[in-house]
């Protein structure tokens, strides 16, 4: 059972996706929809085994869910994004896994960008990579 | 002027209806993104996010999603700062009201990503000096150039505009019950307030009207229309007669007469042209208000042309007299009558001293002479 580690991070959830800011280090973490669903599940009362079960039910017994879920939760803890909770939170829990649109078992993870203050100085129209958008800067040359 | 594609975008955002492929083609089909306004792109991103950015042209989708993402991060960065400052004020026993964008995010359009360059907060006038001290003790610094209604504090690149009056001319003081009618809301575990829906609506439109007159932020045409629609929708079926009466109490009726026709054109389901004409007629009092505003704009253009030519750091009696004339015109056109109606005693000398943060004319002269010697 986990909670957002509010001592270090600030999380924002909107329209199916989380973004997380580490207000101590200035790092910014971006989650895709599938990973956001898993993060949402563990924050609303689900443990690793119930999340894994939900994936197995959705994608079949050979989808490789267990190591992917375990790795993702470990990475969230190591980054200080989540912390262990004493009691489970109320919420949809593992049912959120059912909302994932991917047709096969998705890769789970998050992208980390360092020094969000510098990233925000970029003009998000003219100084960013046209194929990727903010926060990826335009390459020189 | 609001373009057709902007009108479509705003109507879709406010209604919550899903957009079609054809509608996205109208809004983004031939877009030259390098020439677009950030406001439009952000709102397009706001709409697109509801459907996974479906139908947004491939060549611009990455940058539009990136713009949306960057503003989500900016908004998120405000949050811990805002909550920390609210906590210090509330712990000091000072009631706090969120205004403008902060109120929109906390209550009227919760979680909606927006352009926000600063945070507007109000405290009761009698607690204003105390609130300044509390915020300064928390690490903020008062910036030069306060306005009669609000002072700006800064910390680490973030601004708070701390209001002692919500309306520039003290309209809330005139009404007398602005704080009583306010709506409680919890932010970061502390209880604060936001203006009541009709008061928030009038406040947003009054600000828009004054910006238009002074030519500030004219490119932000969509933001105020969106905010106005979201706010008035929260009030249920609007009673426009009541809103007009309230605007009169808040000394903002002429502002609404100026901008409501644009609002009505876009959201006829919220206010018809007929209601506009009935309750917000552009009558003689409006025309007098508009004439005074236009007089000040002429003076402002003239002053800026002259001021641009002054060498930096130069001082002299002619310059000082020209500055005094400028502020006297602003006082006469924008402040004098409404301050009087609001029961606020602020003569022109008081107004002038306030702007230059001086307690007396003697202090201002000594400061001027001191700089001259240096």
Image (spheres, coloured by chain):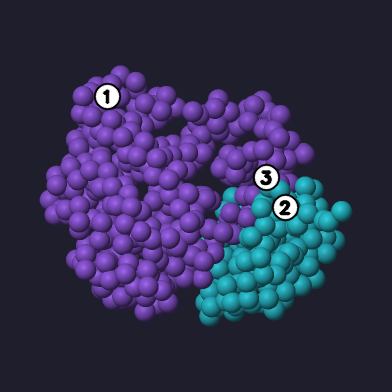
Left or right for B274, reference A73: left
Q: Tell me the SS state at disc 1.
A: loop
Residue designated by label 2: A127
Q: Classify mark 1: residues with Cα within 10 Å, few (<14), some (14-19) or many (20+).
A: some
User: What is the chain identity of the residue bearing mark 2?
Assistant: A
Identify the residue position indicated by label 1 in the image: B282
Query: Relative to the observer, which residue lies in front, B364 or B209?
Result: B364
Chain coloured cyan: which letter?
Answer: A
> Which residue does the image show at 28% across and 76% down from the upper left?
B92
Is A90 placed above or below B48 here? below
**C-alpha gap between disc 2 and disc 1:** 46 Å
Q: Quadrant of the C terminus of chain B?
A: bottom left
**Is residue B179 visible in the rendered structure shown here?**
no
Q: Check disc 3 and report the residue beneath it.
A: B64
Asked if marks 1 and 3 fall on the same chain, the answer is yes
- Taking the image as shown, residue B33 lies to the left or right of residue A8, namely right
SS type, badge 3: helix
């Amino acid at each position: 059972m986990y909670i957002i580690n509010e001592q270090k991070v600030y999380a924002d959830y909107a329209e199916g996706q989380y973004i997380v800011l580490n207000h101590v280090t200035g790092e910014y973490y971006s989650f895709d929809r599938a990973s956001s669903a898993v993060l949402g599940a563990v924050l609303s009362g689900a443990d690793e085994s119930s999340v894994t079960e939900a994936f197995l039910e959705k994608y079949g017994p050979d989808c490789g869910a267990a190591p992917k879920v375990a790795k993702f939760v470990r990475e969230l803890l190591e980054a200080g994004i989540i912390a262990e909770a004493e009691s489970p939170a109320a919420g949809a829990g593992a049912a959120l896994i059912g909302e994932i649109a991917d047709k096969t078992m998705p890769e789970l993870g998050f992208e980390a960008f360092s020094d969000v203050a510098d990233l925000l100085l970029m003009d998000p129209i003219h100084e960013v990579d046209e194929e990727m958008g903010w926060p990826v800067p335009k390459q020189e040359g | 002027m609001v373009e057709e594609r902007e009108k479509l975008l705003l109507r879709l955002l406010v209604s919550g209806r899903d957009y079609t492929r054809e509608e996205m083609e109208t809004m983004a089909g031939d877009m030259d993104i390098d020439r677009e306004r950030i406001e439009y792109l952000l709102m397009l991103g706001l709409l697109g996010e509801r459907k996974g950015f479906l139908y947004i042209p491939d060549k611009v989708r990455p940058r539009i999603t990136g713009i949306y993402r960057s503003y989500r991060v900016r908004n998120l960065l405000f949050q811990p700062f805002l909550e920390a400052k609210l906590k210090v004020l509330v712990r000091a026993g000072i009631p706090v009201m969120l205004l403008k964008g902060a109120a929109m995010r906390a209550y009227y359009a919760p979680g909606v990503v927006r352009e926000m360059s600063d945070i507007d907060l109000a405290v009761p006038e009698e607690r204003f000096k105390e609130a300044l001290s509390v915020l300064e003790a928390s690490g903020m610094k008062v910036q030069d150039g306060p306005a009669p209604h609000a002072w700006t504090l800064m910390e680490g690149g973030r601004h708070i505009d701390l209001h002692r009056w919500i309306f520039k001319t003290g309209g809330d003081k005139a009404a007398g019950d602005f704080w009583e009618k306010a709506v409680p809301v919890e932010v970061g575990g502390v209880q604060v307030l936001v203006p009541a829906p009709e008061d928030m609506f009038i406040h947003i439109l009054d600000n828009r009207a004054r910006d238009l007159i002074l030519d500030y932020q004219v490119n932000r045409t969509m933001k105020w229309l969106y905010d106005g629609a979201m706010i008035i929708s929260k009030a249920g079926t609007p009673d426009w007669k009541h809103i007009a009466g309230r605007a009169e109490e808040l000394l903002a009726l002429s502002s609404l007469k100026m901008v409501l026709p644009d609002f009505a054109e876009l959201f006829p389901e919220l206010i018809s042209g007929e209601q506009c004409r009935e309750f917000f007629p552009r009558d003689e009092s409006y025309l007098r208000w508009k004439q005074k505003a236009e007089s000040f704009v002429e003076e402002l253009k003239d002053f800026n042309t002259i001021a641009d030519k002054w060498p930096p750091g130069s001082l002299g009696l002619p310059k000082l007299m020209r500055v005094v004339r400028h502020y006297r015109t602003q006082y006469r056109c924008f402040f004098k009558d409404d301050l009087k109606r609001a029961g606020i005693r602020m003569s022109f000398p008081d107004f002038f001293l306030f702007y230059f943060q001086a307690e007396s004319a003697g202090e201002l002269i000594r400061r001027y002479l001191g700089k001259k010697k240096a």
